[in-house]
Amino acid sequence: MTLDQLEKGQICHVTGFAPDSEDLVIKLREIGFAESDEVELMHRGPLGANPLCFRLNRTLIALRSDEARAIEVETSQ
Amino acid sequence: MSRLRLALVGAPNSGKSTLFNGLTGGLAKVANYSGVTVETRTGRLQTPGGTEIDLIDLPGIYGLKARSADERIAIELLCNGRDDEPAPDGILVLIDAAHLRTHLHTVLQMRAIGRPMIVVLNMIDLAERDGLKIDVDRLRNELGVPVVTSRATRAAGRADLLACLDAETANWPARNAAAENTVCTTDIDLTALQREARGIANRAILFEPAMNRLTRQVDNFVLHPLAGPIILSALLFFMFQAVYSWSGPFMDGIEAGAAALGDLTGRLLPAGWLHDLIVDGIIAGVGSVVVFLPQIVILFLFILALEASGYMARAAVLMDELMLRVGLNGRAFIPLLSSFACAIPGIMSARTIDNERDRLTTIMVAPLMTCSARLPVYTLIIGAFIPPDAVGPFNLQGIVMFGLYLTGVVSAVTVAFVLKRTVTKGTNQVLIMELPTYKLPNPRDFFLSLWGHISAFLRRAGTIILTTSIILWFLASYPGSATSLRDSYAGMIGSVLEKILAPIGFNLEIAIALVPGMAAREVAVGALGTVYAIQGGEENVEGLAAALQGAWSLPTALAFLAWYVFAPQCFATLATTRRETNSWAWTGFMFSYLMALAYIAAGATYHIASWAGL
């Protein structure tokens, strides 16, 4: 699944990035997203929509769902 | 030995400017969000061991693949030097210890440049308070470069770094040798570097607690989908009410002081032109602006507190969806919110927006945000013409003030909407923004930056407003044979403008005050003070507000307020726009569209108010 499909409070790990959006992936990697990192959806934007606030390790990062869709994840059991 | 050039680099909001200020005694602006520093700044320091260092503070970067204007500045300087600034001899890489795992790859990217470097684990006290345990020796061995911990806000917290600088810089190769092997390509393999960084983090981080609890708890309210926007609006509304109502007693005090000073000077000096110049020109002109100092102080107290606490980035998140509808993004909200203080830093911080068209749009609408220089104008007119009636728990004057701010915001949003669909069309940029951990502001930084704003305001009153008051006094008082303002030099100039401004309800005095008012908005208040002081002669003891009540109709006063929501009466803003856009066309466009809006808004207000019988 991709990161934008996460429910609030659900924890997952990054498994990879969308192959077709290179520029976006560079930006996501530079701010810190990397394979095997732990990510949790902490907050949704006003009225439950965009932007989404994720906890990446111990860091809080805001993305829109378009950006979150470029991150492939696997939920932890 | 020549001075050592040392660059401060690191992720945005890792505390580079705080460390810079601490080491050099500088006054760089610091706040708790990403992208506060958009320019390079150099300061000097001497280590305890006697090494002379030029320290260069750079905009924050996560890596070497530059995108936005501020990031490109940092990377260019780091790799090859810029214009007259040579590349640095060495690099201090700052990293927020609390986010070591997420940000460690930035250190590896900097290491790839191949310059001597020292890694500084900053804000170690906060990370340790959270319970994070880092094996610094292990990190040093794994990275193969010196690593020190620091607490940039305290002298004691910087001691290790200074000692390390003394020990390390002695062994650094000479500048030429270092400059030759720069590998500033974007060719680095980010994936591999990240894998390496995560491996090092796994071995060097002994214990990693959950995310900062306070931040998590506060955000549950502040970023709540429903409560969040309500808190944001309440906060802004409270801020403007406070600016208006808390400042009252202080302003009365300053006003009484200015009146007493004028009175005293009036009695000490013999009647004559010098007496008139000092009492009517200088004291009336400068005094009518200095009165607004308490409001400026309260406004900046709020804005600085929002910036330093970490709330600013949350506000940007909450506004993102709305900004997206307009065609901008949440990132643009920070430059626009700082424009409430002054459009100039707002326009400059638009550099953090990496999409050029979004940056231009943001610059174009920044002057519509109500800057602090409009406060004197608004307060003067509202105080003179709007009764302080209670409306529920609020005060009518405060509501009108809030309405003026709101008009500015709504206009900015509308103009941005139109621009994005016409002249600055293009794809929307993405939103990727780190939200800082909440922090208590450092008192020293907080009050120094408050003082910076206060002294800038007073300096303007002492220079530009003083000068224009004197010049205006001469122009309005001569030729000596003139019996009325209309026959003076100022009156002759004003009469020309009056023809254009009469249809929107402006009189000769306003036309005269708007000319020096082009320099800066609050200058118009000083100019009105001088003009009405000369006209009022000896009877003018009630102050400027009373003089205006007698001379202006309510529709004229309202039209004047509407004019100031839009009018680009600030040379410095236009000059900054010219520099940041590098285009006379865009600067001219900004000036013309704002002037046109000001004229239309003032005219419409005047005629509607007259028609309504106000």
Image (tube, coloured by chain):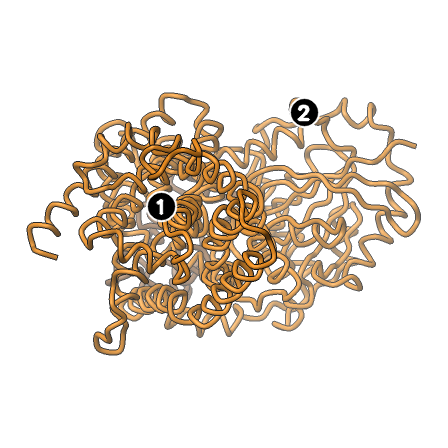
Q: Name chain A's colour.
A: brown
Q: Which chain is orange?
A: B
Asked if residue B559 shows in the view, the reply is yes
**Hey, what amino acid is under mark 2?**
Asn
Q: Considering depth in this image, is A11 or A67 the residue closer to the camera?
A: A67
Q: Residue B601: horizontal and vertical position, in percent?
A: 20, 42
Q: Residue A42: horizontal and vertical position, in percent?
A: 39, 65
Tell which tag, 1 or 2, sits nearer the viewer: 2
Dot label at residue A51: none
Quarter-wise, where is residue B423 in the image?
top left
**Hey, what amino acid is under mark 1?**
Glu
Q: Considering depth in this image, is B151 or B290 the residue closer to the camera?
A: B290
Q: Residue at x 50, y 33 (%)?
A: B69
Q: Residue B397: horizontal and vertical position, in percent?
A: 28, 66
Q: Secondary structure at mark 2?
A: loop
What residue would you read off at disc 2?
Answer: B80
Residue furthest bottom as drawn: B393
Q: Residue at x 36, y 67 (%)?
A: B235
Q: Considering depth in this image, is B437 or B138 the residue closer to the camera?
A: B437
What residue would you read off at disc 1?
Answer: A67
Marks 1 and 2 belong to one chain: no
Left or right of residue B536, residue B123 in this image: right
Chain at numbered mark 2: B
Quarter-wise, where is residue B74 in the image?
top right
Chain at numbered mark 1: A
